[in-house]
Amino acid sequence: MPEHILGLSTEAIGIWIAALLTLAIYSFLYRDNPVYKFAEHLFVGISAGYGVGITYQQVVIDLIYKPLLRPAEVGALAPDYLVIVPTILGALMFLRFSRKHGWLARWPICLVMGYGAGAAIPATVQNMLEHTRYTMQPLVPFNTETQGYEWAAGISMFIMVIAVVTTLAYFYFSKEHKGALGTAGRIGIYFLMIAFGAGFGNTVMARISLLIGRFQFMFYDWWPLVVGIFHRG
Amino acid sequence: MIEKLLHLDRRVIFVFIALAVGVPMVGGWKFDQGSNPRTTAVHKYIEDLPDRSVVLLCFDYGPASMPELQPMALAIAQHVLSRDLRLVCMTTYPDAPLLIEDTLATVVERLEKEKGIKREDGKDYVNLGYRPGLVNVILGMSADIGAVWKTDFNDRRYGDLAVTKGVRTFKDVGLVIDLASSSTPGAWVVYAHERYKVKVACGVTAVMAQDYYPYLQTHQLVGMLNGMKGAAEYEKLVGLESDASKAMGPQSCAHFLIIALVIFGNIVYAVSRRRARRQTP
């Protein structure tokens, strides 16, 4: 690949393309327009093409072609014929496009669902029990090293217990929310609101971070190129 | 006036946000971020690892999450490689293998230029590349890592690499760090930590951070880096002033503006409701 095209370095051309596409995408903030649509479709197409390219190289070549036809390249002495079984099952997925043989695509789907459920259910239950266990700690923990009670941790633990119980009360629908259950449920709503607020705050932080990322690119990478053009001019 | 404010064109707010981000960036405003125990825990764990331990860094994100996660990757990779540790990178995202290449090249060049530390591809670090199906990959790695990654991203055989010598299962891995833009840290905890007791830490986008606090409380995660702020905190811990640290000025200003807008919006809404109530006969 040449380092320069029409007097511009390939890196500078890349930065210009990225900058113009960034502006095209942000033009949506004013209103929907054809330039935005073009950039959006380009993004979808390139992402799909890139994904297919990497998957072909890293999956089809590395996990199917080499173990079967070039075993030495993956450190094996003989071809691994077991690879043929998942390859056929995977290929059966494509039969969904056939009306006559589409039913065969159910076999690999069944396998994936069965395997997925078998792997996920015990692990999920184990994880849930682990989290439940940690809500059943002493209200005021005793530190064996300092031989004293940790009152600050105790306050956190107390708030957590109240939050868990009242939030569960809010989601208990088998009895009308009156009396003690109603009061607990109302307190639970406040804890839920705090959690939603924290979630919203984190979401704002994430979205602003993405905007800053684009601003940094435009300001640190693209703007010096623009200034360079005027200086040369 | 109140009616106008209630129906304010959202593009006006976009301009304010752009100014809140752009002005501090041009002005180079800095806000010291300090550090929090979740970030420090990851740094301390890496500091305490014995020499030549293996840190498995998983890049489970694509370019769309780069502003938050790429600074984390750069800071953590720099920390690991500045010590005498082995860095093994992998991904279950097809977008990420070239992000790994870029990260490693940047860090190795920076370490050599700024600190005179030379690190060698295949001896001190490696990019294993991409494999699909996270759960299958984790469960496969628990039996034999070399069976899942027969070759690395540059087509070198796993068994021939000095960096992965003696690394067969999770028992041989000092720490797994998952940099994630989706729910992959949960899978690492459930399938790798709970079953095989490998230590797991994570760096996540701020949107997801809330989901992982329970895992910190149960000590299933060693620590966690939360979004760009977490990356800035880690940069500070490793003495680096890069994109995340520079972003804290604009981010703080944008946050102040959003807080102000939320308060202002609520006041306008409350005033309009009171007026509407008074006008109702």
Image (cartoon, coloured by chain):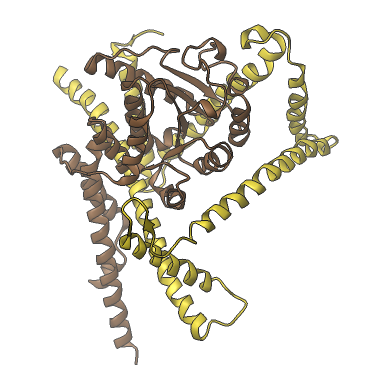
Chain colours: A yellow, B brown
The answer to whether residue B67 of the structure is visible from this angle is: no
Write the residue at 32% across / 85% down.
Answer: B277
The answer to whether residue A103 of the structure is visible from this angle is: yes
Question: In the depicted view, which residue is nearer to us: B11 or B97?
Answer: B97
Residue A144: horizontal and vertical position, in percent? 37, 53
Q: Quadrant of residue B235?
A: top left
Write the residue at 74% across / 33% down.
Answer: A93
Question: In the depicted view, which residue is nearer to us: A183 or A150?
Answer: A150
Q: Quadrant of residue B105?
A: top left
Establish if B203 lies above or below A80: below
Establish if B51 lies above or below B20: above
Question: In the depicted view, which residue is nearer to us: B56 or B101?
Answer: B56
Where's the C terminus of chain B, which quadrant?
bottom left
Residue B24: horizontal and vertical position, in percent? 17, 42
Establish if B148 lies above or below A5: below
Would residue A64 be found to the left or right of residue B160 on screen? right
Write the residue at 27% across / 40% down.
Answer: B233
Write the residue at 44% across / 62% down.
Answer: A138
